[in-house]
Structures are given as structure tokens and as C-alpha cells.
Amino acid sequence: MSSSCDAILKALKECLLNSDCVQKQGHLPSECLKQHSDELPEQCQLLRKSTFECKRNMLDMRTRFRGNTVGMDAEKLRQQKTPAPPAQS
């Protein structure tokens, strides 16, 4: 898979692993996505939709020329969360 969707996939995995479906109920993350998606927190549901959009845009010829904006937005968010290295004098 393209690296444009990696940031969204990582965020979705992290969200699933921290959800009650996995933590308290003991389901596998894949089971939570397929069978218990309505029980997931809203953030996980939004990340799931974003992952779908990112994958779909990879196949859409119009967005292939322009670039995958869904994945690019996630990458920008990830970079904003990561603190910048201190400037050396």
C-alpha cells in the first residue's frame, strides 16, 4: 500500500487497540472493525471512514494525478503532533 495512507492506518490501529472493544471485551481489533463497529468510539469510526476514503482515492484516476489529499492531511497532522527538534547553536 502507498505511504500516503500509512499515517491514517497507524492512527486507526492505535485507536482500535485503545478502544473498550479490545481492552475490556477482549475482541481482536479485526473483529471490532467487522462485527462491532457501532460500539467503537467516534474517533475510531472517523478514522475507519478516512482509511476507506484514502484507499478509494488511490484507485481513482482523477486523484492519482492530483495526489491523495486524505493521506496528505493525515501526514500533516502527524507532523504537527511530533515536536520539532531543538535548533542547535
Image (cartoon, grey):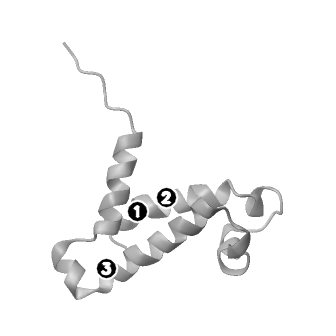
Q: Earlier in the sequence, mark 3 or mark 2?
A: 2
The image position of residue 9, as x and y in percent, is 48, 64
Query: SS at mark 2?
Result: helix
- Relative placement, left or right, of 50 versus 70 is right
Q: Mark 1 packing: few (<14 Cα in 10 Å), some, or many (20+)?
A: some
Image quadrant in which you'd find residue 66: bottom left
Whole-percent x, y for residue 56 in the image: 38, 82
Residue that numbered label 3 is attached to: 58
Where is residue 5? Give x, y as percent: 38, 67
Say which residue appears at 49% left-offset and 58% top-offset.
10
Read off the residue under disc 2: 10
Out of 70 and 27, give the one closest to the viewer. 70
The CA distance from mark 1 to mark 3 is 12 Å
Hey, what amino acid is under mark 1? Asp
- Tag count: 3
Rendered residue at 39%/38% (across/down): 82
Residue 6, disc: 1
Report which quarter residue 70 is drawn in. bottom left
Question: Seen from this angle, which residue lies furthest left?
Answer: 65
What residue is drawn where x is 30% and y is 61%? 72
Secondary element type, mark 3? helix
Neighbour tally class for label 2: few under 14, some 14-19, many 20 plus, Cα within 10 Å? few
Quadrant of the rendering where the N terminus is positioned: bottom left
| In the image, residue 59 above or below residue 25 | below
Compared with residue 36, is residue 19 higher up or lower down, i.e. above or below?
above
- Residue 80 spot, x, y in % from top left: 36, 42
The reply to whether discs 2 and 1 touch (Cβ–Cβ < 8 Å) is yes
Q: Amino acid at mark 2?
A: Lys
Q: Nearer the viewer, residue 34 or 47?
A: 47
Callout 3 amino acid: Met
The CA span between labels 3 and 2 is 17 Å
